[in-house]
Image: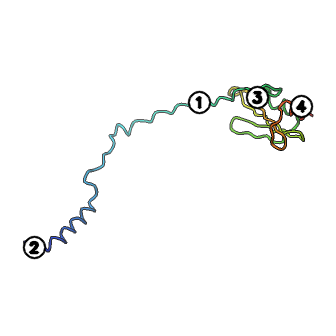
Protein backbone atom coordinates (compact mmCIF):
# COMPACT_ATOMS: atom_id res chain seq x y z
CA UNK A 1 0.00 0.00 0.00
CA UNK A 2 1.26 3.47 -0.91
CA UNK A 3 1.18 6.01 1.79
CA UNK A 4 0.17 9.62 1.13
CA UNK A 5 3.57 11.03 2.00
CA UNK A 6 5.10 9.00 -0.90
CA UNK A 7 2.72 10.46 -3.52
CA UNK A 8 4.61 13.80 -3.81
CA UNK A 9 7.88 12.31 -5.13
CA UNK A 10 6.01 9.89 -7.41
CA UNK A 11 3.90 12.72 -8.88
CA UNK A 12 7.03 14.84 -9.42
CA UNK A 13 8.78 11.96 -11.17
CA UNK A 14 5.73 11.41 -13.40
CA UNK A 15 5.68 15.09 -14.40
CA UNK A 16 9.40 15.07 -15.11
CA UNK A 17 9.11 12.02 -17.35
CA UNK A 18 6.03 13.44 -19.12
CA UNK A 19 8.02 16.55 -20.08
CA UNK A 20 10.63 14.41 -21.82
CA UNK A 21 8.14 12.37 -23.80
CA UNK A 22 7.62 14.93 -26.61
CA UNK A 23 4.35 15.84 -28.30
CA UNK A 24 1.45 13.46 -27.91
CA UNK A 25 0.20 14.13 -31.46
CA UNK A 26 2.65 13.23 -34.22
CA UNK A 27 3.40 15.85 -36.89
CA UNK A 28 1.61 15.40 -40.18
CA UNK A 29 3.78 14.71 -43.18
CA UNK A 30 2.73 16.06 -46.57
CA UNK A 31 1.31 13.50 -48.95
CA UNK A 32 3.81 12.23 -51.49
CA UNK A 33 1.80 13.62 -54.39
CA UNK A 34 2.20 17.18 -53.02
CA UNK A 35 5.96 16.80 -52.65
CA UNK A 36 6.33 15.32 -56.14
CA UNK A 37 4.54 18.22 -57.89
CA UNK A 38 6.97 20.50 -59.72
CA UNK A 39 6.81 24.20 -58.97
CA UNK A 40 5.14 26.18 -61.74
CA UNK A 41 7.54 28.22 -63.88
CA UNK A 42 7.82 31.90 -63.05
CA UNK A 43 6.66 34.31 -65.72
CA UNK A 44 9.39 36.13 -67.62
CA UNK A 45 10.12 39.57 -66.15
CA UNK A 46 8.48 42.45 -67.95
CA UNK A 47 11.09 44.62 -69.67
CA UNK A 48 11.47 48.08 -68.20
CA UNK A 49 10.08 50.69 -70.54
CA UNK A 50 12.41 53.60 -71.30
CA UNK A 51 11.39 56.98 -69.95
CA UNK A 52 8.87 58.90 -72.02
CA UNK A 53 10.40 61.82 -73.97
CA UNK A 54 8.96 65.08 -72.68
CA UNK A 55 11.75 67.54 -73.50
CA UNK A 56 12.47 69.28 -76.75
CA UNK A 57 16.00 70.50 -77.34
CA UNK A 58 18.75 69.84 -79.86
CA UNK A 59 20.08 66.76 -77.97
CA UNK A 60 16.84 64.80 -77.46
CA UNK A 61 16.52 61.86 -79.85
CA UNK A 62 20.21 61.82 -80.80
CA UNK A 63 22.88 59.31 -79.73
CA UNK A 64 25.86 59.96 -77.48
CA UNK A 65 28.19 60.44 -80.46
CA UNK A 66 26.22 63.56 -81.44
CA UNK A 67 26.78 65.14 -78.00
CA UNK A 68 30.45 64.17 -77.97
CA UNK A 69 30.79 65.75 -81.43
CA UNK A 70 29.29 69.01 -80.10
CA UNK A 71 31.02 69.24 -76.72
CA UNK A 72 34.10 67.00 -76.85
CA UNK A 73 34.99 64.39 -74.24
CA UNK A 74 32.47 64.23 -71.36
CA UNK A 75 33.60 64.91 -67.80
CA UNK A 76 31.59 61.84 -66.68
CA UNK A 77 30.37 58.78 -68.57
CA UNK A 78 28.26 56.62 -66.24
CA UNK A 79 26.30 53.47 -67.13
CA UNK A 80 23.60 52.26 -64.73
CA UNK A 81 21.47 49.30 -65.76
CA UNK A 82 20.14 50.04 -69.23
CA UNK A 83 20.76 53.79 -68.94
CA UNK A 84 23.78 55.96 -69.59
CA UNK A 85 24.59 59.50 -68.43
CA UNK A 86 27.12 61.82 -70.02
CA UNK A 87 28.10 64.97 -68.15
CA UNK A 88 29.68 67.94 -69.88
CA UNK A 89 30.97 70.91 -67.90
CA UNK A 90 32.34 74.37 -68.57
CA UNK A 91 32.69 77.69 -66.77
CA UNK A 92 29.06 78.64 -67.52
CA UNK A 93 27.21 75.43 -66.68
CA UNK A 94 27.05 71.67 -66.22
CA UNK A 95 24.97 69.57 -68.60
CA UNK A 96 23.75 66.02 -67.87
CA UNK A 97 22.41 64.01 -70.83
CA UNK A 98 20.57 60.72 -70.17
CA UNK A 99 20.39 57.97 -72.80
CA UNK A 100 18.04 54.99 -73.07
CA UNK A 101 17.40 52.59 -75.97
CA UNK A 102 13.91 53.11 -77.44
CA UNK A 103 13.60 49.32 -77.76
CA UNK A 104 15.75 46.34 -76.85
CA UNK A 105 18.78 46.05 -79.12
CA UNK A 106 18.47 49.62 -80.44
CA UNK A 107 21.12 52.31 -79.98
CA UNK A 108 20.47 54.46 -76.87
CA UNK A 109 19.17 57.96 -77.58
CA UNK A 110 19.04 61.09 -75.43
CA UNK A 111 15.72 61.15 -73.59
CA UNK A 112 16.36 63.75 -70.86
CA UNK A 113 18.74 66.67 -70.30
CA UNK A 114 19.46 68.65 -67.12
CA UNK A 115 21.44 71.89 -66.91
CA UNK A 116 22.68 73.78 -63.87
CA UNK A 117 25.06 76.58 -63.01
CA UNK A 118 28.31 75.62 -61.25
CA UNK A 119 26.76 76.76 -57.93
CA UNK A 120 23.87 74.26 -58.37
CA UNK A 121 21.09 76.64 -59.50
CA UNK A 122 18.98 75.54 -62.47
CA UNK A 123 20.20 76.84 -65.82
CA UNK A 124 18.63 77.11 -69.25
CA UNK A 125 19.23 73.88 -71.17
CA UNK A 126 19.42 75.65 -74.54
CA UNK A 127 21.72 78.34 -73.08
CA UNK A 128 23.99 75.69 -71.58
CA UNK A 129 24.10 73.73 -74.87
CA UNK A 130 25.19 76.93 -76.67
CA UNK A 131 27.77 77.82 -73.99
CA UNK A 132 29.40 74.36 -74.05
CA UNK A 133 29.73 73.92 -77.82
CA UNK A 134 33.33 73.96 -78.95
Q: Using the numbered discs, state the Cα–Cα distance from disc 4 to disc 2 in whole angstroms.
A: 108 Å
Q: Are marks 3 and 2 in contact (CB under 8 Å)?
A: no
For image coordinates 27% across by 62% down, the residue present is: 19
Nearer to us of marks 2 and 1 is 2
Find disc 1 in the rendering and name its residue: 46
Mark-to-mark CA distance, 3 and 4: 20 Å
Please, what secondary structure does the residue beneath circle 1 have? loop
Whole-number angstrom distance, CA of label 2 to CA of label 1: 79 Å
Looking at the image, which is closer to me, 59 or 91?
A: 91
Disc 3: which residue: 109
Q: Secondary structure at mark 4?
A: helix
Q: Nearer the viewer, mark 3 or mark 4?
A: 4
Q: Which residue does the numbered mark 2 point to in the structure image?
A: 3
Return the residue at label 4. Answer: 130
Q: Secondary structure at mark 3?
A: strand
x%, y% of residue 7? 15, 70
Amino acid sequence: MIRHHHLGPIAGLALLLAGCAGPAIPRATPPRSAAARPTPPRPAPTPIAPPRVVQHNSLIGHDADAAIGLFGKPRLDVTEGTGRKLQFAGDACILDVYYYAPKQGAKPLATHVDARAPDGRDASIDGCISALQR
